[in-house]
Image: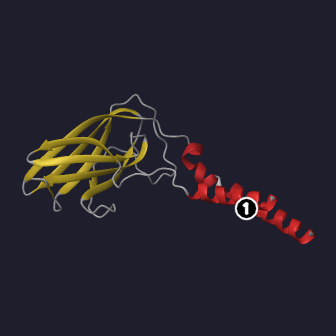
Amino acid sequence: MARLAIRCAFAAMVAFAALPLEARADGGAVIARETSEGFDLTVFAAPAPLRAGPADVSVLVQEGGKPVLDARVSVRWTAAGGGQEWQPPCCSMKTDERAVEAVLGHSQNKILYSAMLVVPSSGAGKLDVRVERGGREATLTAGLDARPAPSPAAAYWPWLAVTPAAIAAFALNQTLKRRKSRT
């Protein structure tokens, strides 16, 4: 009976560890939508709501209800100032306010123009999206509020928990083997 309880507990622990922490559709949540110069622009972002640090920004460009797949799309975050500055985990991540080109094929949804954008600080800011196609230029500006970045321990706890979980599983395995060899 004790073995069955231990096996059930172990199976439940493995099943729980296999569950995703978060489920999202490709592209994140809709953060802005606007019609400009005949283009319908929809902007998605993950994480939602935006936080200081890296963010996946995707743009759906439509004309007459059909996706446009031959445009040039760029995104830029401009901080209003006064928020808590985000410190990147490595110095190769740029935190300046240059425009980032969004490209097709970056995400699984092949009709979204996507880019990894760094939000340099929390607080008020604006997201500028620029679309160029056939001599026309459309822009979308969304005033947004970025939340502070999560603490490193909160952001990386699933990866940090793997080692103690593996040690506990090994210890449980050895204990069960010793009990089995005694009988």
Residue at x-position 13% and y-position 46% = 138
Which residue is more in the foreground, 94 or 32? 32
Residue at x-position 6% and y-position 55% = 135
Q: Residue flagged by tag 1: what amino acid is it?
A: Arg
Q: Quick check: 29 left or right of 111?
A: right
Instruction: Look at mark 1 in the image and give the residue it sits on.
Output: 7
Q: Position of residue 124 (x, y in %)?
A: 35, 31
Please identify the residue farthest to the top as the structure is shown.
82
Q: Position of residue 85 (x, y in %)?
A: 45, 36
Determine crowd level at label 1: few under 14, some 14-19, many 20+ residues with C-alpha closer than 10 A. Answer: few
Please identify the residue farthest to the bottom as the structure is shown.
181
Please identify the residue farthest to the right as the structure is shown.
182
User: Where on the picture, by quarter, is residue 35?
Assistant: top left
Looking at the rendering, in which quadrant would you find the C terminus? bottom right
Residue at x-position 17% and y-position 41% = 34
Q: Position of residue 115 (x, y in %)?
A: 32, 54
How many dots with numbers? 1
Q: Where is residue 79 in the image (x, y as percent from the top left)?
A: 34, 35
Describe the colour scheme in one phrase.
secondary structure
Q: Quick check: 62 left or right of 103?
A: left
Residue at x-position 8% and y-position 46% = 37
Please identify the residue farthest to the front as the structure is shown.
1
